[in-house]
Amino acid sequence: MKTPIADFIENYIGNDISRLHMPGHKGAGALGVENWDITEIKGAGNLYEYEGIIAESEANAASLFESGHTFYSAGGSSQSIRAMLYLAVQNYRYGKPVIVAARNVHKAFIYAAAMLDFDVCWLYPEGDLRSLCSCSITAESVEKALQSLERPAAAVYITSPDYLGGQADIAAISDVCRRNGTLLLVDNAHGAYLKFLQPSQHPIDLGADMCCDSAHKTLPVLTGGGYLHLSKRLHPVYAKSAKTAMEMFGSTSPSYLIMTSLDKCNAYIADGYAEKLVKAAALCGETKEKLSQNGWKLEKTDPLRITICAPNGLTGEDLAEKLREHKAECEFSDTDFLVLMVTPETSKKDYDRVIHALGENTYAYSAKKPLEGLLRERKMTIREAMMSPREKVAAEESLGCVCANAGVGCPPAIPVVIPGEVIDEGAFALLKHYGIETIDVVRNKRRIDNAGAFLGSAFMRNDIFMGYFEFDGRKYGLIEKPEFFCVTELAALCLDDVVDGEQCVPLYTAHFVPREDIYCWDPVPAELYCDWKNPVSVEKTDKKLSIETFERI
């Protein structure tokens, strides 16, 4: 198969041309690959145009994947996720778009929701929740969700394979989507190679309308290389907007090193890759069998993944350390699992190291308590929460706050709490389970818990009150300090309510009006933005503050 991008750059290098253009390294540097790194010079094409050598290479990829269209991403699946969601909502005609999505979404989905401002109808896992990485759903649960909506869904969105290697019944789910007149979008970041199994397990072949692949995760492509695939069944209007969608969420200076590796990968796939895949899957299967014989419990996964369950007394991190002691590094580990990813490039020595490092398992397995706390109150949309002023607080101080950001690491980049949700006891338990010590919360969206104890960090300081004011002849103390210019209401206590014998005192909300002579963008302290001693109204809430907590603090 031809490699037009690689051929062009190789010819450019061979002609010894003076590089009076970007990049600044001019083809020389410490890495030794700089001569292959160019920019959009004449003849080099443009990633976001439908003609030229890049488009020609993309057409080669589309022929290999047997898709209607395949577009390159130099920003991984994150770029493609946002693009296909944009395409889904761009053509929606029933008001504010709504996406039905399995809860184990990558945070790129959350950021797309913030930018595109669509609603989400979450699909929660059926059965016990063992990991945020997985979300077992069925075609029946998708159908039920679609039928429950007040307006048609713009799309159904699932992740398959998930981070642990679980695969959804895409064929059945796609049938449901077609019957209900909606699109099926699949985050197939971990499954580009699935196309070349016999038979194919790729989402496009199983009925998905659009899907993203992270080529770099399972194919010999540089990090950041990915695909956006459109099905042949999809209306042509989507393909006409696809380049615009990709450009909206990608750099105008995409890496030619990444695009060249995608180009070269086409030739690699065309030259006997399917046969290599058969051998790799067999070798991986043999390794799984040996690990099982050695007493390790494995998850059912896609063919090129090994997911080991941590037994009682060990964590996935402990297993990862065992590997590192034997010069092997895993893809992912957490409290409950160890994940290994392999390809045809994984050698027999690599597999042997895994078996030797883990050895015989001498620990017992027993049923672990399922994770809980995914269902929680929503106070804001994802967009509202992520566009709001925020602050980072310790997880233990976040109870009652509204989550402001899907700020979790990658891997696995699956949010514990969705922006806009209230952080309750269940959410806090999940944060603790996954070792997350801090979280971004919306400023001044503090809450009072059911016991009445104020949970905001402002109340945890040395001073009991942040300030005082009088209203209708009664004296009040503020228990929140204004920390941002847009604050126009604060929590307060009435000092007259604090009398002997009372166990709890009512909580009030004091309302203020911003000063007319100061604009929100003026660089003045928040305390000066309003007259904090003269509220326009004071309302008694249905919440109470524990005297015991009050006196202790």
Image: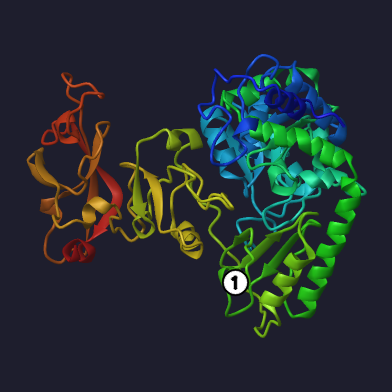
Would you name the residue on which mark 1 appears? 369
Task: Residue at 76%, 74% (x, y): give it.
Answer: 291
Task: Residue at 32%, 52% (x, y): give it.
Answer: 448
Q: Measured along the vertical axis of the image, is residue 439 above or below residue 322? A: above
- Element class at badge 1: loop
Quadrant assignment, res 259: top right
Q: Position of residue 151 (x, y in %)?
A: 66, 29
Q: Position of residue 232 (x, y in %)?
A: 85, 27
Q: Is residue 211 visible?
A: no
Q: Measured along the vertical axis of the image, is residue 430 above or below residue 441? A: below
Closest to the observer, 67 or 545:
67
Q: Position of residue 2 (x, y in %)?
A: 85, 29
Closest to the observer, 514 or 245:
245
Q: Position of residue 379 (x, y in %)?
A: 44, 41
The amino acid type of the residue labelled 1 equals Lys
Q: Is residue 38 visible?
A: yes
Closest to the observer, 500 or 15:
15
Q: Quarter of the image containing the N terminus?
A: top right
Task: Residue at 30%, 52% (x, y): give it.
Answer: 543
Quadrant assignment, res 179: top right
